[in-house]
Image (cartoon, helix red, strand yellow):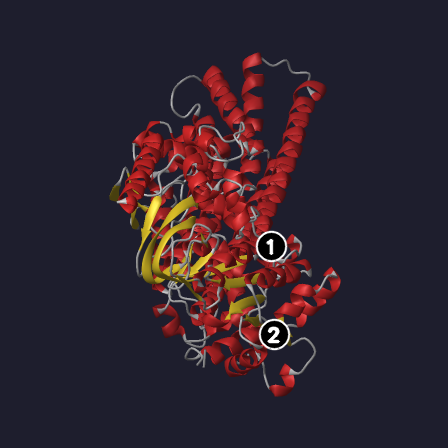
Amino acid sequence: MCFSSIFAYLMLVEKGRRACFKRSPCTCCCTMNIPDIRTSTTGDFGIGREELVALTKNDDVGGLEQYGGIQGLECLLKTNLEDGINGEDADVVKRKSFFGANTYPAEKSKSFLTCLWEACHQDISLIIFIVVAVASSVMGLVTKGTRFGYWEEGGNVAVVVMVNIIVKAICKYSQSLIHNVKEEGRNMKVVVRGGKQVEVSICDIVVGDVIPLNIGDQVPAYGILITAQSLSIDTSRVNGDNNIVSFHASSGASRLKPGSEIADGSGTMLVTSVGICTKSELSQDIGNKTTLEEVLNEVATSIGNVGLAAAFIVMMVLLLRWFMYLVLIFGVKTKPRDVIEEVNQIIIIAFNIAVAAVPQGLPLAVTLTIFSATKRMVADNAFVRRPFACVTMAVVKNILCDKTVLTLNEDRCQPGVKEWVQLCQRDGVKVRMVTRDNLQTAKAIGLECGILDSDADATMPNHLFDGREFGELTDDRQRQECAKRIKVMAWCSPDVKLLFVQALKQSGEMVAVTGYVTEDAHALQQADIGLAMDIRGTEVAKESSDIIILDDSFATCVKAFKWGRSVHANIIKFMQLQLTVNVVALTTNFMAAVFYGHVPLNAVQVLWVNLIIVALVPLSLVTKPPADELMLGHLVKPGQPLKRYVKWKRLVFQGMYQIVAILIINFQGRSLLKSYNRGHAIKVKNTMIFNTFVVCQIIHQVEARKKGILSKPKKWITSNYLFMGIAGTILVSQFIVIEFLGKAFSTVALNQKEWQFSLTLGFAEMLFAIILFVKYLTHRN
């Protein structure tokens, strides 16, 4: 009877507590000994986001007791330990807004309109070109009228400017796209809301949610354990320790971290921190700019400045010459209309010179190359989350590997891993292994994988190192010197692994690091390249990485290195081609403008060469998988100046040939043009120059594929079908442009002799390519 009375009393108290929660959750705080921590930062809740993050990280019971235990936290979060939050949409939105969503903040994708605006206002040369286009069109209309043919030069200026802006915007927009590892919403999770179990996306889990835990489940967020029934949790995917933690009774003091797996039993948890809070603890230094990207920006800026300077000089020279010729020498009085017309022509000439120096094709070629490579890398089980990461891989000289990437389990290595390690070591990429195993096990694995050459190698100073001792080093210089010598590190926790990465970077090394557990996130972000494992990796690790290894294989890591080398080498080739185009066009136009008062290559023609030749022809390079010999290629060390990336002798010789060929047309071509009047003869001559210029760029591409062209010509042809198809398409397009699109490109139709003359000079550059190839063979032998 007494027992029944007590039980009934307890049930009434519990019922009253629940009713109190449902009516006004915060009023129950008055009946509990909970400190008043409500501040301006806690909003509608009794505890703020920062306090929850600190509470989650603090594993002692006292940290929770200051809030009145888990029951006090229940009240402060306006939830219920059995029924969960009320589940209304407004409440879920409010919790997401205040505590954050269970997603990881990434670089936001820009809209195309934003990229278009940035392309317009961030490049001062385009602003100048827009002003020139408008001014030229207005002056053409004023002086020559509205008939087509009187203002087409200003119209051409406008077309070139618009195409440049659109191309730049497309490149910016493409590079801003964020690759998601999975579609959000595909991973579903059961939560308790309003007393009912409902299935929601893992991205829609919010602070205050109550989540049932069953065998095989993965903890989706940071939280506190509410109940446990013979519960066992595997924490190996959190910190790498193969620990199974058991709970046999209810506990409100046990913290749970995302990535933990339920090995046995069941329980419930209260969510206290979601993805954005977890991510905020990590380093925010996740910029994508690489050494090569900076070099490309320097190329565009430098040659653009040279073009603007050359255009200004030409404009001043032509204005001064015209002024002296008309006024000072002859004293001729000119009409305002004639002055406007002459100034307009001089401005157009200066504009054409400036456009000749703008590398319009390079950004597009680089973007197409990188995105083509990242797409093909997926077939090799490497998912690139940040596009320029595959370029950075080319110059990384250290890869810090977890033991799990090299082995199948505690006793065996992955098949062929020793050969892959030797390939990296031969190229100068130092493979270093970290493991939480003891020194003897670490040494055995290091020897089997080929990271340690022999027992004697393992006894060399610092080659085999204890991670606990490394973590105790206090002198930064000593730690850096030690890090550079370490080949295998035993007893290496995630915190020591982070120190290892930081020490290598501080010593001037570029580092790639592998990881899969939640606590690897810091090291993955701090490294130049973070490689997360997909099969065993947690979402936190993947979201902190640059590249995801889909099969958890070390061989795939090496393939990512080869892809990086391939992309890096191709971009350098494109830059070489682009510089040749710009140097030849700029020099030719500058000389012709100073000596003759006109330019043979106008803005539309230069744009055609840039976008069709420089941007399309390189696509045939990126369709080939990377070869093993790329790992042996010589790369420019990071941080080197622009001059180290350019093959100056080749640029000078090829540029000189093309300039000489154009001068031959300019002078010797007159013998073919005797039957024409002076105005038409100039147009024919300029058309022949344009034609030769295009053919020279195609032949220039052949030189980039010199390997096998003489020794195995049949194999060379069959392996370059795409290139030959693109080159043939360009030649056909060039014929259509000259014969049928003369008004748009300021060209005239050529007869058979004129075609032969210009094509012969263009294809003659093949001899130059053969000479370079013979020199290459001699040097190699």
The spot of residue 361 in percent (x, y) is 47, 46
Proximity of marks 1 and 2: CB atoms separated by less than 8 Å: no
553 horizontally vs 337: left or right = left
Residue drawn at (48%, 18%) of the image: 138
* Element on which disc 1 rests: helix
* Lateral position of residue 397 relative to residue 9, left or right: right
- What amino acid is found at the position of numbered circle 2 in the picture? Lys
Circle number at residue 656? 1
What's the mark number on residue 392? none
| Quarter placement of the C terminus | bottom right
Residue 250 placement (x, y as % from top left): 38, 54
Q: Foreground: 698 or 20?
A: 20
| Quarter of the rendering occupied by the N terminus | top left
Q: Which of the 4 image quadrants contains residue 25? A: top left
Question: Residue 662: x, y in percent?
Answer: 54, 49
Element type at marker 2? loop
Task: Characterize the local packing of mark 2: few (<14), some (14-19) or many (20 or more) Cα atoms within 10 angstroms.
Answer: many
Q: 419 or 212: which is nearer to us?
A: 212
| Front-most of residues 753 and 441 | 441
Q: Could you tell me residue 441's position as x and y percent? A: 53, 80
Gap between marks 1 and 2 measured at Cα: 50 Å
Q: What residue type is disc 1 on?
A: Met
Mark 1 burial class by Cα count in 10 Å: few <14, some 14-19, many 20+: some
Relative to 646, say whether 364 is above or below. Answer: above
Q: What is the number of the mark on residue 487?
A: 2
Task: State the image quarter where residue 116 is shown.
Answer: top left
- Seen in the picture, residue 643 relative to 168 is either above or below; the reply is below
Q: Is residue 281 left or right of residue 105?
A: right
Would you say residue 713 is visible in this rendering?
yes
Q: Residue furthest front?
A: 1
Residue 671 visible in the current orientation: no
